[in-house]
Image (cartoon, rainbow, N blue to C red):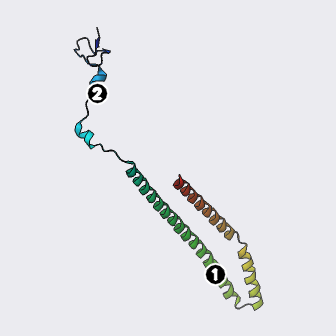
Amino acid sequence: MNTAECIKCGENFRKFSTKSRDRVCHECKRVKPRNYKQVAKIVEVTNSDLEARVIAMEKSLDALHTVIGVQINQTVGHTVEYIVDDIIDKKFSELKTTLSSSMTKNKKDTIDEVEKMLKADSTTKAVGLLKGQLTRQMKAINALRQEIEDIHNQ
């Protein structure tokens, strides 16, 4: 009573109501012919066009990797330059103060004091910490470069 045979496909389907006069099943109703204008707009892309696009994308990726590498080098260079300038300025000012205060003292005491400072500065913890920090930053940069190369090689 609630079923009917489809005119198009011949299968039995369930009606929504007992008073429904539908003679076409729900699947056959949903199939609509394509609009000719839409079909005409669809254009197939050839392999050569796709290959040209891939080559263009590879070139742009190469350019991006180059830019990233340059930016990393510049950033690290500025950071290292700032740290080294700071250390040199501090040590130079310490040496100036030592020399100016020791001008009135005995010459031998001044030379001994300068030598002690130079030995102490070469083993200062701050310099070691800065070297460690620079080493860690360089390792991080090398790791980033390696990741970029791995991504590019894929």
Q: Residue at x 28, y 13 (%)?
A: 5
Considering depth in this image, is 142 or 53 the residue closer to the camera? Answer: 53
Q: Nearer the viewer, mark 2 or mark 1?
A: 2
Looking at this rendering, what residue extends furthest in the top direction? Answer: 1
> What amino acid type is highlighted by mark number 1?
Phe
Query: Residue 147 lies in what quarter of the image?
Result: bottom right
Q: Residues within 10 Å of mark 2 (few under 14, many from 20)?
A: few
Q: Residues within 10 Å of mark 1 (few under 14, many from 20)?
A: few
Query: Residue 133 lies in what quarter of the image?
Result: bottom right
Considering depth in this image, is 123 or 5 the residue closer to the camera? Answer: 5
Q: Residue at x 71, y 91 (%)?
A: 104
**Which residue is the site of mark 1?**
92
**Tag 1's secondary structure?**
helix
Q: Residue at x 60, y 74 (%)?
A: 84
> What is the x, y in percent for residue 141?
58, 61
Could you tell which of marks 2 and 1 lies nearer the N-terminus?
A: 2
Considering depth in this image, is 19 or 151 the residue closer to the camera? Answer: 151
> What is the x, y in percent for residue 154?
53, 51
**Tag 2's secondary structure?**
loop
Q: Is residue 74 above or below residue 38?
A: below
> What is the x, y in percent for residue 42?
29, 42
Q: Residue at x 58, y 70 (%)?
A: 80
Q: Is residue 52 above or below residue 36?
A: below
Query: Residue 34 lies in what quarter of the image?
Result: top left
Per the model, the C-alpha gap separating discs 2 and 1 is: 86 Å
**Which residue is the site of mark 2?**
31
Residue 71, disc: none
Position of 2 with respect to 66 (left or right) is left
For the question of whether residue 106 can be seen, the reply is no
For the question of whether residue 115 can be seen, the reply is yes
> What is the x, y in percent for residue 58?
46, 56
> What amino acid type is highlighted by mark number 2?
Val
